[in-house]
Image (cartoon, helix red, strand yellow):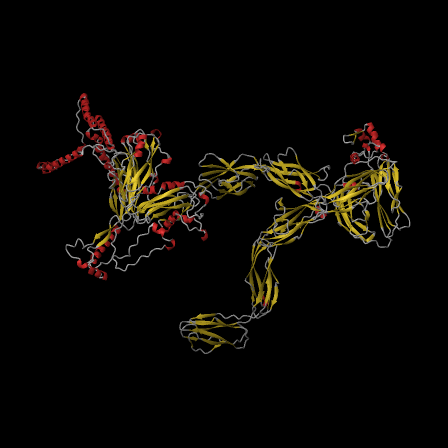
């Protein structure tokens, strides 16, 4: 690979580009080396460069001379180096320019070795005890050869650690990281090189050691997708079960375990199999591989195989899977059962009946394989038997049956019975009874039937089969035997004691197969042969006869006859054919072998039937004593092969080369089968050389395999508890070359287990009454299944329990038994237990006992919690909040606990125990568990309130024990652990203030509150949301309609009122406040905001009327909201601005949804009315008006009002239909319940009128009447008036009783009293915007004070209170004034009630004018007037003016458009047109046009809704106004508009008598009753409007005090009198004389002196004085009006009071009675009130401190 020459780095100095330095390499001393240094001018101007020669003589260059470089040119300066020594040289050359100087270094270096190594090697993460490697390269970048040596670090190694590197070469190095612990490792690898390794390079190495983590899953399939198909069950911690179920023997079952590495590093693992005495003998489980590596976040599959050997054996084994470096391992428990075939015969007895000699009978039976295992079978019979079986062997596939044909051909006249054995491979042998009888004419034996066989089997089990029939008959006659109902013989006790010496029990099929072999270990049979097989060996054919002897023994107590089935013509025969044998005797028989062919194998089964002698004649036996004969067989073998000749080549296979017998007890037998298969076509002779002295035996031990299959049964009978193993030889065809070896392994075992901790079980300290559990390991170390049973004494059974108490331990299985310790008192316990063990297969065996000791201690304890009380504060309903609790156990014993939660809400006093599951407001992550000794546990509580209430939870704990029963055993009552409190809340907002601007600036706060239905809105917002409203937590698009369906039932109307078209917009500022304790997010959604954005094809282009109307309003922004959304913290406020433009005439409505996140939804119907010009319209804010409740029977009902607002531009007349009121009157006994005091009238344009009503209930109930209000030249509306009468007997504390459903729409208490909305342009504020005077009596003055503050820092404002309409009732001081910046003034409001009882709901307006802006306005107005004056002399000559002059068309008068006070445009004559016509002529100026005002052309009027609707939506666009080319005029300045501050006054006045009766004496009021009856107009003030009584007297046609004529006469007379007095000189002199008289001090308050006559005289005088007064009251006409009643009552009370005071104070001085005069009291009240008001004013101005400490002045002491 070619090397790349790097370009030397260059730099620019003062516009000169030059190399950073010059270096000489590969030089020798004495040489000359030259390099060029290139200088380049990179500037755009010529530069001059000079340089200095190097000081060293080793570096030279040209003689210094100036170098001139033009722009972009270069110059190469030669530098020469002349070394003389072999060392490093270094020098610099200095260059100078006009801007400065710079230097360039020159170096000459010697060659040295240099290695390039990486800076860092990061091995990443590696498993502990594993290693990871990284290969990297080091390079020799020098021209010198070098050696290198690496110094290893701990855990980091390098290979190779040393080496040699030629110059310019690379070398590959391998670094290995082997962590030993889970930690972060860092280090340095040092590479030393160079001469004597003085140079070095370091490499930083990093690595992280991690513990691997393996988990195991079990699967059955071979694919990774079938992970859940396997059976996996975690029995104990870190133990996984792999259950193979039942597996056929001699087959292999496979299952897969999946090792899952959940760590980020490789996980090397190794699998170890436990080594026990069991699996050393019989190991049936294995794995495909025992070690490997699982990649990170990956899996590795390991195959587990089960290959059982012994049918019916249950096997258990354990594998431990451990990751390298991990301290824990996972145990895999493998379990399986060997399954053998299940072959059954369809019958157990085959009867051929009775035949004559020579005849043949045929019968069949079936052999069926009921298992899923293929197996082989063969019948232990020869083809030469009297019972000839056509199929001697075969193979049965699963579920297949085979029919076997048996032919019976008897010759000898005897009874035949043979118990034919069917030997199945890997299954117990089966037997079928073949019976038949042969008769001749001379001999007729007893016929044999199947019942006789059954009876014989029963007698055999009872030990009666050894008795001959004749003896049984005698015992029957003697009564020692009896016959039961089944025909079976039953022995008596006497016979059992005398004759029956041993009783035989049932034996297995394999044991019965070996029964006829006469050995010492076998049981004694009835008849036996001393040989089971006779082998003649090698014989010569046709030479001679070969004989051998066989002996037969009679073991019965009767005489028997032996009949051999033989033929002298066969190769094997026996003589004699029959013989009788006495009881206990033997007889020898000769077996003769006569071969006829050479090189042949001969084999035959010789068959003999032995029976009792009496069985030969049916007359000698009875039916119940018939005994079947016994069939005995002996095999005969021989061959005719020469000694050295070769036999047939055997083609035989065996099923196994090792037979493992199942474990047995001492004295018991175990059996296994071996399948021999002849795959050739020649017979095979086989022989097993089993030692007769060993525990093993087989049948047949030798034989001739002429058929395909032969099953050989092996037996083991161990004599001691030990393992037996023997290797035998299988000789085949008498040839040693074909001999095979077979290993036989068996063991005799007894029950034995190992106990954990050498049989000692320790329990930790346990709380008294609680339960402590421990697992105790018990392992079966034998191959026997062991039945175990634990035994605890009855006294200690309540203290110690175990699960399971009894069960079975499989071979090599380890079980963990759970022990429970329940102490009853505080002490230490030591309890002894016993474990009984027995062989699981032998239920009669005596058990073996093993001891165990359990040690424990009883203690006491309790649970504590930190903190004891938890306050979760506020949680949103439907959301959740989590908090952690710490419970701890400070005792010495562990505690089992169970937690319960009890709930008590704020709206219920009951306590409810909440369940531990399901939906609940407080949920614990754990309701029960175990808290160890001195341990802590963290509980997580989750609060999820479902209602808006306060939850008080109490967490209780119960100490309990886990007894396996659900709920546990509670040992002590529940104890309080801690308390949890939370508030279920919803995010809520409320409207706390409202302010109007634009056309709503003149509306009072009460009216705005009423029109916007803010009380109802706040009630809706404060209510709980419904489930439908909580469907969406926040505002979202969920509807496909343009007008979505709203899920809320909270609907209210936001009324923007009515105003003429093109009026100023109605702007409402609402102050919304987060009234809840949590953060609230809100949004206002228009209908399109909730519509899903559909595809174009899903949109419908058709709009209905409502959708088109809504679209028009939204497109033109008729209703505007700002902001549309917000989020408020608790207590935070925000201003919401709603506006309505009067752009379209008519009633405009728009639904807007107010959505609070996770809270309420309120549908707001925005409604506004725009009145067309000339239309008469009255706005009804409410069509249902509720009057305030009035007590029943009140003498003077208060006047209440209903307000109508004229929203049009013209005055509107109204007429109220009073016929429903008259009908209501007739229905109530002609009593006026509801009276309208002004049924008709006029409403000025843009104003409202309050119609007075009188509500006088007759009963305590609700009255309702529908009244029609007709608007003149307008529509008629129906309004429902509702009033409630209250009964005094059920009065509430406030004197009212009213149904909650009939409350007035506006409550004075709900209207805020202070302003919180910040309005733009507002400079002054009132400290209180609404005053509630409450219930006051007539003729009393009530005062309130407030502050008016100028909040501006720069502007001066003036204020003026408009009290024209309420000046007779309300007095405000000061009524006007000026406030400097930041100045405030104290305002006093006085309410004097001297009219009849009524409700006051006044709105007083304070006009605030910005005087600073007014000053600017005045200056601008003066400038404008000057400009107007100047414009009279400025004109423009136009062609249009000249043309008009020629045509004679000129204006006779110039007009100017001005704006009047009401905002209307009026045309006013300009100066100099009308006023100046008399002084100067303007005819010469008519041809000229003055300059127009500066500004743009007027905006065209907005389109109407009909025009907008007709126009296509796609063509809508804003019209650009045309720019006028005419000269402009200066606009006349407009004065600043005054700002309206509204002050609301609310009060209710009562008649004095009613007030006294209801509230008692007015201690808090000063009642100032007028002394004269001056007729005064009555005022009903509400909402700032008032009307006089003369306009709507409720008693029409009532006569006044004087008639009109009398009034005119009195007026004329008084005028004449006054005029005459003015002209009378004596009157003038009298008036002047009064100025000279002394003025008395309160002479008008002086009472006349009263003499003190005698008692009689004084009484008479008193009566004389009272008479005129009474007469005056009597002479006065009875009062007919409310005012008159009040005057009369007050004057009568005053007169009576004065009379009583006069009589009590006759002897007192006059100055002490002065306060009893009403005028004096009024004067004193006024003085005190003014004094206090002055003090408050001074305090407000800072001149007086009301909070300073009072000064104590001591009076001077008398001398």
Choose between 1243 and 1562: the one closer to the eye: 1243
**Which quadrant would the N terminus be assigned to in this image?**
bottom right
Q: In this view, does 483 lie to the left or right of 1363?
A: right
Q: Quadrant of the C terminus?
A: top left
Q: Give the left or right position of residue 1449, taking residue 111 as reference.
A: left
Q: Could one spot residue 969 in this view of the protein? A: yes
The answer to whether residue 721 is left or right of residue 1157 is right
Provide residue 895's location: percent of width, then percent of height. 56, 39
Residue sticking out furthest to the front: 1447
Instruction: Please tell me how many numbered marks the rendered image carries.
Output: 0
For residue 1304, which quarter of the picture?
top left
Percent of width and height locating residue 982: 46, 40
Find residue 1125 and report its horizontal and vertical position in percent: 40, 48
The spot of residue 1651 in percent (x, y) is: 17, 25
Q: Quadrant of residue 550?
A: top right
Residue that sits furthest to the top in the current view: 1656
- 70, 114: nearer the viewer: 70
Front residue of this view, candidates 504 and 910:
504
Task: Tell me if residue 1000 can be seen.
Answer: no
Residue 452, compared with residue 388, is above or below; it is above
**From what the image shows, is residue 494 above or below residue 905?**
above
Extreme residue toward the right, this view:
544
To which quarter of the image does residue 618 belong?
top right
């Amino acid at each position: 690979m070619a090397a790349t020459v790097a370009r030397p780095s260059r730099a620019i100095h003062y516009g000169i580009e030059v190399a950073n330095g010059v270096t000489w390499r590969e030089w020798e001393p004495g040489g000359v080396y030259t390099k060029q240094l290139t200088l380049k001018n990179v500037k755009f101007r010529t530069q001059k460069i000079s340089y200095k020669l190097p000081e060293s003589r080793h570096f030279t260059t040209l003689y210094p001379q100036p170098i001139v470089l033009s722009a972009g040119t270069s110059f190469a300066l030669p530098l020469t180096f002349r070394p003389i020594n072999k060392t490093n040289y270094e020098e610099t050359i200095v260059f100078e320019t006009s801007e400065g100087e710079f230097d360039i270094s020159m170096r000459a270096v010697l060659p040295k070795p240099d290695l390039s190594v990486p800076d860092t090697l990061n091995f990443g993460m590696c498993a502990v005890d594993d290693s990871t490697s990284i290969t990297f390269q080091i390079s020799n970048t020098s021209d010198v050869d070098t050696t290198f040596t690496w110094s290893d670090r701990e855990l980091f190694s390098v290979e190779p650690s040393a080496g040699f590197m030629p110059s310019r070469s690379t070398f590959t190095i391998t670094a290995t990281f082997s962590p030993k612990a889970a930690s972060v490792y860092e280090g340095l690898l040092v590479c030393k090189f160079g001469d004597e390794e003085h140079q070095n390079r370091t490499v930083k190495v990093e690595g992280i050691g991690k513990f691997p983590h393996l988990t195991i899953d079990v699967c059955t399939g071979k694919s990774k997708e079938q992970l859940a198909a396997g059976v996996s069950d975690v029995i104990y911690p870190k133990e996984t079960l792999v259950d193979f179920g039942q597996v056929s023997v001699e087959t292999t079952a496979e299952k897969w375990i999946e090792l899952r590495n959940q760590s980020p590093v490789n996980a090397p693992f190794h699998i170890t199999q436990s080594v026990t005495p069991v699996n050393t003998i019989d190991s049936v489980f294995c794995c495909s591989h025992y070690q490997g590596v699982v990649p990170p976040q990956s899996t590795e599959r390991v195959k587990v195989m089960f290959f059982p050997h012994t049918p019916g054996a249950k096997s258990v084994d354990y594998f431990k899977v451990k990751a390298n470096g991990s301290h824990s391992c996972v145990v895999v428990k493998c379990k399986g059962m060997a399954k053998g075939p299940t072959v059954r015969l369809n019958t157990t007895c085959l009867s051929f009946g009775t035949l004559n000699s020579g005849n043949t009978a045929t019968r069949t039976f079936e052999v069926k394989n009921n298992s899923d295992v293929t197996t082989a079978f063969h019948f232990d019979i020869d083809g030469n038997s009297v019972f000839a079986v056509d199929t001697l062997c075969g193979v049965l596939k699963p579920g297949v049956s085979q029919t076997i044909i048996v032919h019976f051909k008897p010759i000898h006249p005897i009874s035949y019975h043979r118990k034919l054995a069917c030997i199945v491979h890997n299954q117990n042998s089966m037997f079928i009874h073949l019976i038949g009888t042969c008769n001749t004419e001379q001999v007729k034996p007893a016929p044999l039937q199947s019942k006789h066989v059954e009876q014989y089997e029963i007698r055999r089990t009872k030990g009666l089969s050894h008795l001959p029939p004749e003896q049984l008959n005698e015992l029957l006659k003697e009564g020692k035997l009896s016959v039961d109902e089944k025909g079976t013989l039953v022995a008596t006790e006497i016979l059992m004691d005398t004759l029956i010496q041993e009783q035989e029990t049932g034996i297995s099929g394999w044991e019965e197969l070996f029964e006829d072999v006469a050995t010492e270990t076998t049981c004694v049979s009835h008849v036996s042969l001393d040989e089971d097989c006779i082998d003649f060996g090698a014989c010569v054919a046709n030479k001679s006869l070969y004989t051998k002897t066989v002996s037969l023994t009679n073991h019965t107590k009767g005489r028997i006859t032996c009949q051999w089935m033989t033929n002298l013509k066969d190769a094997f025969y026996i003589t004699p054919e029959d013989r009788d044998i006495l009881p206990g005797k033997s007889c020898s028989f000769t077996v003769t072998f006569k071969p006829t062919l050479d090189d042949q194998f001969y084999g035959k089964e010789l068959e003999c039937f032995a029976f009792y002698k009496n069985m030969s004649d049916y007359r000698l036996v009875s039916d119940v004593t018939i005994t079947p004969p016994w069939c005995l067989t002996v095999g005969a073998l021989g061959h005719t092969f020469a000694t050295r000749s070769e036999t047939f080549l055997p083609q035989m296979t065996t099923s196994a080369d090792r037979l493992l017998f199942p474990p047995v007890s001492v004295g018991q037998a175990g059996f296994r089968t071996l399948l021999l298969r002849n795959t050739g076509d020649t017979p095979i002779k086989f022989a097993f050389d089993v030692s007769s002295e060993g525990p093993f035996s087989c049948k047949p031990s030798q034989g001739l395999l002429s058929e395909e299959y032969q099953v050989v049964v092996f037996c083991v009978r161990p004599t001691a508890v030990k393992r037996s193993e023997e290797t035998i030889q299988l000789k085949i065809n008498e040839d040693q070359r074909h001999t095979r070896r077979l290993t036989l392994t068996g063991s005799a075992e007894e029950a034995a287990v190992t106990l954990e901790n050498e049989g000692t079980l320790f329990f930790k300290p346990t709380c008294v009454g609680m339960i402590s559990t421990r697992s105790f390991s018990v392992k079966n170390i034998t191959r026997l299944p062991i039945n175990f049973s634990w035994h605890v004494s009855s006294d200690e059974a309540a203290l110690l329990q175990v699960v399971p108490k009894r069960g079975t331990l499989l071979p090599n299985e380890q079980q963990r038994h759970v022990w429970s310790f329940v102490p009853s008192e505080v002490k230490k316990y030591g309890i002894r237990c016993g474990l009984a063990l027995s062989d699981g297969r032998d239920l009669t065996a005596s058990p073996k006992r093993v001891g165990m000791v359990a040690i424990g201690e009883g203690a006491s304890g309790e649970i504590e919690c930190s903190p004891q009380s938890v306050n979760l504060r506020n949680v949103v309903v439907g959301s959740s909040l989590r908090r952690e609790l710490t419970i701890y156990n400070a005792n010495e014993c562990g505690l089992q606990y169970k937690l319960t939660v009890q709930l008590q809400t704020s709206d219920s006093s009951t306590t409810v125990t909440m369940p531990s599951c399901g939906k609940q407001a407080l949920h614990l992550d754990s309701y029960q568990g175990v808290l160890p000794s001195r341990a802590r546990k963290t509980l997580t509580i989750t609060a999820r309130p479902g209602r808006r209430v306060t939850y008080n939870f109490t967490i209780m704990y119960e100490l309990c024990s886990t007894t396996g029963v659900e709920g546990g055993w509670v040992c002590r009552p529940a104890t309080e652990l801690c308390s949890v409190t939370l508030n279920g809340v919803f995010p809520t907002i409320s409207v706390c203030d409202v302010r109007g601007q634009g056309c709503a600036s003149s509306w009072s706060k009460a009216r705005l509150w009423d029109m916007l239905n803010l009380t109802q809105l706040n009630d809706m917002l404060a209510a709980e949301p419904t489930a439908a409203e909580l469907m969406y937590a926040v505002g979202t698009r969920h509807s496909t309609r343009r007008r979505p369906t709203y899920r809320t039932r909270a609907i209210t109307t936001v009324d923007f009122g009515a105003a003429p078209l093109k009026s100023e917009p109605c702007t409402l500022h609402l102050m919304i406040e987060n009234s809840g304790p949590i953060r609230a997010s809100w949004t206002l959604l228009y209908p399109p905001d909730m519509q899903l954005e559909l595809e174009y094809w899903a949109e419908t282009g058709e709009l209905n009327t409502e959708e088109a109307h809504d679209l028009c309003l939204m497109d033109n922004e008729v209703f505007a909201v700002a902001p549309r959304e917000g989020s408020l913290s608790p207590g935070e406020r925000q201003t919401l601005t709603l506006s309505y433009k009067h752009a379209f005439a008519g009633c405009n409505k728009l639904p807007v949804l107010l959505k609070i996140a996770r809270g309420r939804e309120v549908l707001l119907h925005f409604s506004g009315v725009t009145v067309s010009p000339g239309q008469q319209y009255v706005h009804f804010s409410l069509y249902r008006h509720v009057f305030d409740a009035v007590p029943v029977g009140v003498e003077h009902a208060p006047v209440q009002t209903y307000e109508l607002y004229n929203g049009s531009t013209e005055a509107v007349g109204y007429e109220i239909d009073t016929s429903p009121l008259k009908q209501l009157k007739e229905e109530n006994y002609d009593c006026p319940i509801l009276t309208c005091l002004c049924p008709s009238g006029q409403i000025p344009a843009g104003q409202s009128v309050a119609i007075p009503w009188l509500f006088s209930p007759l009963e305590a109930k609700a009255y309702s009447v529908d009244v029609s209000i007709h608007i003149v030249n307008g529509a008629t509306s129906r309004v429902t008036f509702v009033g409630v009468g209250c009964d005094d007997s059920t009065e509430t504390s406030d004197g009212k009783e009213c149904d909650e459903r009939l409350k007035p729409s506006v409550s004075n208490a709900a209207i805020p009293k202070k302003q919180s909305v910040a309005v733009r342009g507002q400079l002054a504020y009132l400290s209180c915007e609404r005053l509630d005077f409450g219930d006051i009596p007539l003729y009393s003055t009530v005062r309130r004070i407030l502050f008016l503050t100028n909040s501006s820092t720069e502007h001066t404002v003036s204020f003026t209170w408009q009290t024209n309409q309420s000046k007779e009732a309300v007095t405000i001081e000061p009524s006007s004034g000026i406030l400097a910046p930041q100045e405030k003034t104290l305002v006093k409001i006085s309410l004097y009630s001297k009219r009849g009882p009524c409700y006051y709901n006044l709105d007083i307006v304070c006009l605030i004018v910005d005087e600073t802006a007014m000053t600017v306005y005045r200056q601008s107005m003066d400038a404008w007037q000057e400009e107007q004056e100047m414009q009279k002399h400025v004109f423009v000559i136009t062609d249009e003016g000249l043309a008009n002059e020629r045509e004679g068309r000129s204006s006779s008068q110039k007009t100017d458009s001005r704006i009047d006070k009401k905002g209307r445009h009026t045309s006013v004559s300009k100066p100099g047109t009308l006023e100046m016509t008399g002084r100067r002529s303007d005819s010469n100026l008519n041809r000229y046009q003055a300059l127009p005002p500066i500004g743009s052309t007027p905006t065209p009027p907005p389109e109407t809704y009909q025009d907008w609707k007709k126009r296509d939506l796609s063509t809508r666009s804003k019209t650009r106004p045309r720019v006028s080319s005419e000269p402009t005029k200066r606009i006349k300045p407009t004065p600043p508009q005054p700002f309206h501050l509204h002050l609301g006054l609310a009060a209710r006045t009562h008649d004095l008598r009613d007030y006294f009766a209801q509230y008692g004496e007015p201690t808090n009021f000063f009642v100032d009753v007028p002394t004269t009856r001056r007729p005064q107009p009555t005022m009903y003030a509400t909402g700032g409007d008032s009307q006089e009584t003369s306009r709507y007297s409720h008693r029409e046609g009532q006569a006044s005090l004087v008639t009109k004529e009398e009034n005119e006469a009195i007026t004329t007379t008084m005028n004449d009198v006054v005029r005459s007095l003015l002209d009378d000189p004596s009157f003038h002199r009298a008036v002047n004389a009064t100025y000279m008289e002394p003025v008395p001090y309160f002479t008008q308050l002086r009472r006349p002196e009263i003499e003190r006559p005698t008692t009689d005289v004084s009484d008479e005088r008193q009566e004389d004085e009272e008479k005129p007064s009474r007469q005056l009251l009597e002479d006065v006409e009875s009062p007919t009006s409310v005012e008159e009643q009040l005057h009369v009552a007050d004057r009568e009370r005053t007169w009576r009071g004065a009379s009583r005071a006069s009589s009590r104070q006759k002897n007192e001085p006059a100055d002490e009675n002065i306060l009893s005069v009403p005028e004096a009291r009024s004067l004193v009240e006024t003085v005190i009130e003014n004094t206090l008001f002055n003090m408050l004013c001074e305090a407000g101005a800072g001149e007086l401190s009301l909070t300073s400490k009072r000064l104590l002045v001591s009076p001077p002491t008398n001398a």
